[in-house]
Image (cartoon, rainbow, N blue to C red):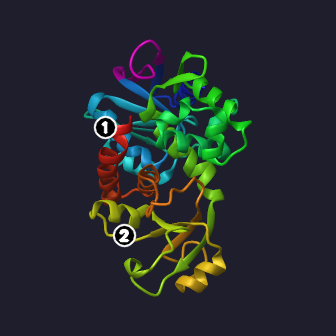
Amino acid sequence: MKEELINIAIENVNQQAYIKAEWIAENGLDGLLKLVINKKEYFYNIEVKKELRQYQLTQINELKKLFRNLIIIAEQIYPNVKEQLRELKIPYLEANGNFFLQNKDYFCLVDTNKKVTLRKEKANRAFTKTGLKIVFHLLNNPELINKTQREIAEIAGVGLGNIPQVINGLKETGYLLTLKKGIYVWEKKDDLINRWINGYATELRPRLTKGTFAIKEDWQKIDLNTAKTIWGGEPAADLLTNYLRPEMLLLYTKESNPELIKKYKFIPKNKGEGELEALDIFWHKKDNETVAPPLLIYAELMITGGKRNIETAQLIYNEYIKPKL
């Protein structure tokens, strides 16, 4: 998939008469991109992404510190992300040939080509709606992978037949290595977290939405029934760190919308109008949980983005997530 994406992107950018691009596959992250512009050569380390989203910018910026000449090649980059890449002066190239480069000698911006869609990769069951739920439990409890498949299924709340498919999917992508039959060790968990966040944002989260609401009082004064309803996102991050003043509120709940309206006096609103969003609880909630698991809070902050959210996400990552990697 990476090779196809790089080759198509290079083929399309080479349609520009003043640019000659070549992929040197053996070097760099995903290889080196050699650019010849006005008879002058430039070399950039390639980082390939199928799609580049807001929450991945922190990772890209950290990568730039390690690889000074870095270029992102992606099938698609969202407009607001392109703008931020340009602000950071990080070059990018989309599969359709849209291109940005700024250095001491040269400035180029092409942003008029229509989107191209590459052939779909073979579906990986670890990153379907059900697979993402299972992987979430495994990331929260890495030792769970070496329990029986029946135990994993019961804890994740899914059918037993899903477990071997997810395990095979994690093995195929290099996130699990087999020590011996039924015993596994984790690899590249940091990368797996990023891939899980992407899947959560695109595949799982949209299916969890219950509704959007306005509230009549300070969110901190709302007396939640924490057996069924807990804070996520920005308010949960504030409760964990005391570092973030929430602007958008998020709840995970087992209560129905009529129960939320009756019990908490929430006012239903159209999507995008209210300050509070309610999502279904999709994991096996523990009795002592009063906020969403740190990985889920981290994911929401990274997806939402913004300087303060990213800073808070890093605090949560360092304290609650990194020790498990």
Residue shown at 45% from the left, 60% from the top: 288
Q: Is residue 127 visible?
A: no
If the image is split into quadrants, where does the N terminus sit?
top right
**189 w.r.t. 154: above or below:** above
* Discs 1, 2 touching: Cβ within 8 Å: no
Identify residue for label 1.
62
**158 w.r.t. 278: above or below:** above
Residue segment shown in magenta:
23-43
Identify residue for label 2.
246
Q: Would residue 164 appear left or right of 228 to someone viewing this image? A: right
- SS label for mark 1: helix
Whole-percent x, y for residue 29 in the image: 41, 22
Q: Amino acid at mark 2?
A: Pro
Residue shown at 31% from the left, 28% from the top: 69
Query: Badge 1, how many Cα within 10 Å: few under 14, some, many 20+?
Result: few
Q: Earlier in the sequence, mark 1 or mark 2?
A: 1
Query: Badge 2, how many Cα within 10 Å: few under 14, some, many 20+?
Result: some
- Residue situated in front as seen by the camera: 269 or 226: 226
